[in-house]
Image (tube, rainbow, N blue to C red):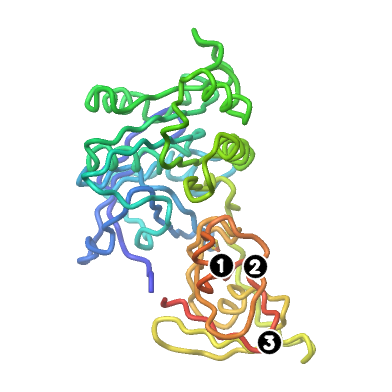
Amino acid sequence: MARFHDLTVTDVRKTIRDAVVVTLRPENGAAKAFDFIQGQYLTFRRDFDGEELRRSYSICAGRDDGVLQVGIKRVDGGAFSTWANDELKPGDRLQAMPPMGGFFVELAPERARHYLGFAGGSGITPVLSILKTTLAREPKSSFSLVYANKGVSSIMFREELEDLKNLYLGRLTVIHVLETDAQEIDLFTGLVTAEKCAQLFATGWIDIDNVDTAFICGPEPMMLGIAGALREAGLDDGQIKFELFASAQPGRAKRNAAPKHTASTANQTVFAITLDGATQTITVSKDTSLLDAALENAIDAPFACRAGVCSTCRCRVLEGEVEMKTNHALEDYEVEKGYVLACQSHAITDTVRVDFDQ
Ligand code: FES
């Protein structure tokens, strides 16, 4: 079961005015637990005025970079991101869970594939990790990136992307699409919509017929438009990988409420929850989410976004049934195997057995 570990901040570097790249060193022999796969994220926790806040940030380093780095963009009103941008410094300690997330495909050195990435704003962080790792580990593969930003000054990792283009000459193409700054090519100005994608495909800027897998990370409306255009162009759902933009996560964690014992018997369910090898049985109202039920009963279930986005609260239903309100995180094959997001799941049977350890 994932648990929080101490990490020391070894470097904090501005990539643009309102975003930092934070380098971390796991402590107390936890380095192995922080071996990551490209495209994964870390979930941090910190107390702000006595309230615990959890936030997830994607790893921006490639697997072969030899460092653990996340990118943190300041979000308006975001306590964690503002603190990280204004106050975090080398020598500070952070607490994070080991890397999580399934925003990647397996790589194989002998394969020659073409990948397409779409990133909006700080959605570049996992895509950068993916493209660096892919170009290093699949020497015959190539990568095209469409990167959407407001203007030139908000492009995170601009120089790093230029360096990568030079390092992997002919294998990495980067198209910057800027909302407000005019560019030489009209098509590269404006928003990345379904129509814009269709034009990029039709004009040959993106050779869509030869794309094996597309990765999309950004705000939801942008992702839906792009996914629609990719399907229209003939890609199937298995070829399209999503990672919802981190700002879809609410900033503050809810305080744990007092246990609710008022629900009528008919409306109650018995959850048997296994975590860290121990099973506890609790009775709660059926309209209490599985995550809240666990937390209200002092079961330290993992979570971060509480919005069905990050998958930190993933667990497996072994018996009984739950209904998931929202799912932006689990793949169809995981749902088929019985995995659910605890923060979005309510019991619909009178007993439910779930396991957070699987
Ligand atoms: Fe993020 Fe449930 S806590 S999906």
**Which quarter shows the C terminus?**
bottom left
Instruction: State the separation of the CA atoms marked 3 and 1.
Output: 17 Å
Q: Residue 258: horizontal and vertical position, in percent?
A: 65, 79
Quarter where residue 33 is shown:
bottom left
Q: Is residue 295 left or right of residue 105?
A: right
Which residue, given by chain and number where applicable, does mark 1 sit on? 341
| Classed neighbour count for the residue bearing mark 2: other residues with Cα under 10 Å, few (<14), some (14–19), many (≥20) | some
Q: Are marks 1 and 2 in contact (CB under 8 Å)?
A: yes
**Which quarter shows the N terminus?**
bottom left
Q: Are marks 3 and 1 in contact (CB under 8 Å)?
A: no
Q: Relative to the observer, which residue lies in front, 198 or 43?
A: 198
Which residue is painted at 73% across and 76% down in the image? 287
State the count of labels: 3
Q: Are marks 3 and 2 in contact (CB under 8 Å)?
A: no
Q: Residue 235: horizontal and vertical position, in percent?
A: 52, 41
Instruction: State the separation of the CA atoms marked 3 and 2.
Output: 16 Å
Which residue is painted at 51% across and 28% down in the image? 148
Amino acid on which the number 3 mark rests in the picture: Thr
Dot 3 or dot 2, earlier in sequence: 3
Give me the disc on residue 324. Answer: 2
Amino acid on which the number 1 mark rests in the picture: Leu
Which residue, given by chain and number where applicable, does mark 3 sit on? 269
